[in-house]
Amino acid sequence: MTEPQAGPDFVQLLDPQGNRVENPDFSYSGSDSDLADALRDLVLTRRIDSEATALQRKGELGLWPPSLGQEAAQVGSARAFTKHDIIVPSYREHGVAWCVGIDPVDMLSTFRGTGMTDWASRPDNFHPYSFVIGTQTLHAVGMAMAQQRDGVVGNQNPEDSGATIVYFGDGATSQGDVNEAFIFAASFAAPVVFFCQNNQYAISEPTTVQSRIPIYRRAAGFGFPGILVDGNDLLAVQVVTDWAMDYARKGNGPVLIEAYTFRMGAHTTSDDPTKYRNDTELEAWQAKDPIERLRRYLLRVGAINQTWLDALAVESDQLAERLRTGCVNLPEPRLADYFEQVYAETPEALLDQRDQHLAYEASFLEPR
């Protein structure tokens, strides 16, 4: 497959040099001030990622899946959500988590082994990270079908409407669960947006080997729309996701978005990407860096200046310090949490199991 170019079949609104691009179907209507806020989110998301990677290298985290290079796909899509939308991540959606208000120290708790996404009980509809490839797509379709039954789909008042978005990578599209999710979503017109971040590699397997056609074109075989967007272009991602979520909220059924991007770092910190890709490929994608293209644009139009960037650098350093301090001071996990954080109202049978297990664990403690 050849590299996609800006046009009707590849939505791009800001090119790698930071120039606005016209598209016949999509346009960005937000302000440059909004884009400055988005740039802040991009920069801070990258700092969270780099700091977490460093913490893993120091032995403070067991693992970390870097999101370097994929920030625009995440921050751009997250800016399209409304209060009734449900967000179902994979395991790399740190930018989405940041944008919906998840404390980055809480993100680290999962990878330190001190907690399992304690934000799941919060009212922001951001669900726990999913580490089993593709399984979350089935859950998301079920959540979307529940939204249909709750009356938040096809609502006359847009303020009361909602849909579900689920994130996964190009490798997940080879999983049976994802294809089953496509079938169910199409059959029941579930209000779900399938957001595929095609970062070109499923660990070491290139997308060109996995798929003979662009991933977004698979949607046609299941009977719903698919759209290809420049995943390093925040403007395009936000506009396309906004359209797709609105399409689903109105009761039209599912949409597949393929955000064409690149994982500049490792699959996880246990991976060595130099074993399966070369410097030439990496350098070509570094020239399309999502942060740099938006920074160039905002400087050109005068929406930001060096003073603004310097203040953001200070904020970034402060966030990094808070992450380092917060990580090493995360509390030890409570054994009871593994029983109490399954249901909104814990059944008596599970409470009995909790009590039995806690008593069993206590039997090993040294008598005082």
Image: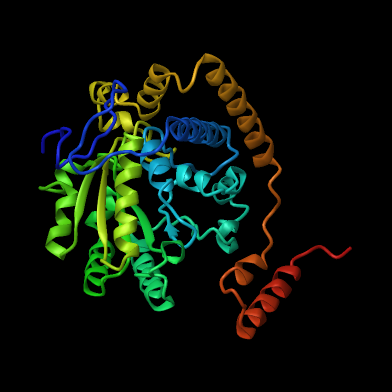
| Nearer the observer, 276 or 1 | 1
- Colour logic: rainbow
Q: Quadrant of the N terminus?
A: top left
| Nearer the observer, 344 or 263 | 344
Q: Quadrant of the C terminus?
A: bottom right
Q: Residue at x 64, y 65 (%)?
A: 337
Asked if residue 367 is positioned above or below residue 217 in the image, the reply reads below
The percent position of residue 352, horizontal first and vertical second, equals 66, 82
Counting every numbered tag in the picture gives 0
Q: Residue at x 56, y 25 (%)?
A: 312
* Relative to 243, 151 lies left or right: right
Res 72 quadrant in image = top left
| Nearer the observer, 167 or 145 | 145
The residue most toward the front is 156
The residue most toward the right is 368
Asked if residue 343 is positioned above or below residue 329 in the image, the reply reads below
Res 220 quadrant in image = bottom left
The percent position of residue 64, horizontal first and vertical second, equals 48, 42
The residue most toward the bottom is 348
Asked if residue 232 is positioned above or below residue 107 in the image, the reply reads above
Q: Residue at x 46, y 62 (%)?
A: 159
* Relative to 365, 183 lies left or right: left
The residue most toward the top is 306
Asked if residue 364 is positioned above or below residue 53 in the image, the reply reads below
* Relative to 187, 326 lies left or right: right
Q: Residue at x 47, y 63 (%)?
A: 84
The percent position of residue 295, horizontal first and vertical second, equals 41, 23
* Relative to 208, 50 lies left or right: right
The percent position of residue 142, horizontal first and vertical second, equals 37, 72
